[in-house]
Image (cartoon, rainbow, N blue to C red):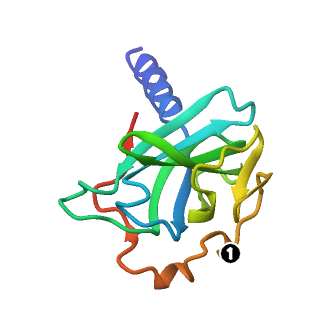
Amino acid sequence: MRLLPNIAISMLLLAACGPPPNVALIEVCGDIEIPFDIDALRISVLEADRRTEHRAGTLDLLNCGGDTLSLPQTTELEAPFGDVWVVVQGLQQGVEVMTSERRVKIEDKGRAQDVLIGLTRSCMRITCDLGQTCIDGVCEQAPWESDQSMCSGGPLSAGAGGGEATCGTEEM
């Protein structure tokens, strides 16, 4: 008789664990100069309705281990299954000075979805309408796909001093 409650508790615990969360592996690239243009990144994952923020975090590019970081930077945030928006804001002393957005379809549960977002100097202080993002100084419909041209700083592997952040993204 004691076996039945133990099995029921075990099944509930397994159900609560569930599959691993979906993860968006977000790489921010570009020709932005740190600390002159920006000193931090705020990265958000929004659900398709754009009203629900699923996850957000900030990455301080100045005080991370006492060093100044450069682009590209890579971080990961949990993302819901399906269509989402990834928004990257470049901050200077806590004030937003640029924003770049991408639409992403998170398809495979438990697998990281690579998301490349470019922050370029040509988009500094440009504000676009909802659903648009700045690309090469012009507001355009936020893309589903990305390519290296978003970076304007050359190939990602050639970025001087970039790479994965050693201190991670601070979730809010």
Visible residue check, residue 20: no
Q: Is residue 15 above or below residue 129?
A: above
Horizontal side of 83 relative to 96 (left or right) equals right
**Residue kind at label 1, given as amino acid type:** Ser
Residue 13 locus on image (x, y percent):
44, 28
Q: Quadrant of the C terminus?
A: top left
Q: Is residue 2 above or below residue 152?
A: above
From the viewer's perspective, is 32 left or right of 122?
A: left
- The residue tagged 1 is 149
Which quarter of the picture shows residue 113? bottom right
Image quadrant of residue 166? bottom left
- Could you tell me residue 87's position as x and y percent? 60, 46
Is residue 45 at all visible to an observer of this figure?
yes
Residue 12 at x, y percent in the picture: 49, 24
* Element marked by disc 1: helix
Residue at the far right in the pictured view: 141
User: 111 or 151, which lies in front?
Assistant: 151
Label 1: how many Cα within 10 Å (few below 14, some 14–19, many 20+): few
Q: 152 or 58, which is in the foreground? A: 152
